[in-house]
Image (cartoon, helix red, strand yellow):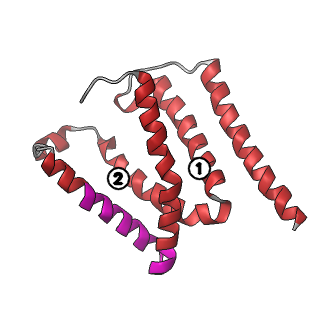
Amino acid sequence: MPNFGPSSLLFAALLAGAAVPFQAGANAMLGRLLGHPLWATMVSLGISLVLVIPVMLASKVPVPMVGALLKGPWWIWIGGVGGVIYITAALLLSPKVGAASFIVAVIAGQMATSLIIDHFGLMGFAARPVSLARVAGLLLIVAGLAVTQWANIAKADQV
């Protein structure tokens, strides 16, 4: 992989994040059409599998040794669990609270958890102590969530 600077990597993360609200909306509609949210979760994960296999084949990614999986820490399996939780939560909650409020709440949860992971160097990350600036960033995100929810409540009161 080419060596990109931090700004380029953050821009790539920004673009990836821009796809998330579309995923939540599409999966919510898929859940309604299929009659149950878990079917939408299954279809979404199935599509992910169908899309990643050709990329892996084209990239000639070697098949991992099964023994390597057995030597890893127990928490390596959390990614799949987290994916199911997130996809299902997105398709259940985003239609009820709106795309913006759902995403801000997700980001607040991610930021709070990320600060803990960074501070303690969990899950293979280098330890990065919590700072006042990082906590302030989290508080701004939480304030953004409160503002988006307050706007929704104020609008509902006017109706």
Considering every residue shown, the one lying at the far right of the view is 158
Q: How many marks?
A: 2
Q: Is residue 8 above or below residue 113?
A: above
Q: Residues within 10 Å of mark 1 (few under 14, many from 20)?
A: some
Which residue is the site of mark 2?
80
Label 1 to label 2: alpha-carbon separation: 20 Å
Q: Position of residue 98 (x, y in %)?
A: 65, 59
Q: Is residue 36 above or below residue 18?
A: below
Q: Nearer the viewer, residue 89 or 44?
A: 44
For the C terminus, the quadrant is bottom right
Residue 34 magenta-drawn? Answer: yes
From which residue to which does the magenta span run?
A: 31-51
Left or right: residue 141 compared with residue 67: right
Q: Quadrant of residue 8?
A: top left
Q: Nearer the viewer, residue 15 or 146?
A: 15
Task: Give the residue at x 66% y 52%.
Answer: 101
Q: Is residue 77 above or below residue 91?
A: above
Q: Quadrant of residue 40?
A: bottom left
Which residue is the site of mark 1?
103
Residue 36 magenta-drawn? Answer: yes
Task: Give the residue at x 60% y 24%.
Answer: 134
Q: Position of residue 74 (x, y in %)?
A: 30, 42
- Secondary structure, mark 2, is helix
Q: Earlier in the sequence, mark 1 or mark 2?
A: 2
Q: Position of residue 91 (x, y in %)?
A: 52, 64
Task: Give the residue at x 75% y 52%.
Answer: 149
Q: Residues within 10 Å of mark 2 (few under 14, many from 20)?
A: few
Q: Position of residue 6 (x, y in %)?
A: 42, 23
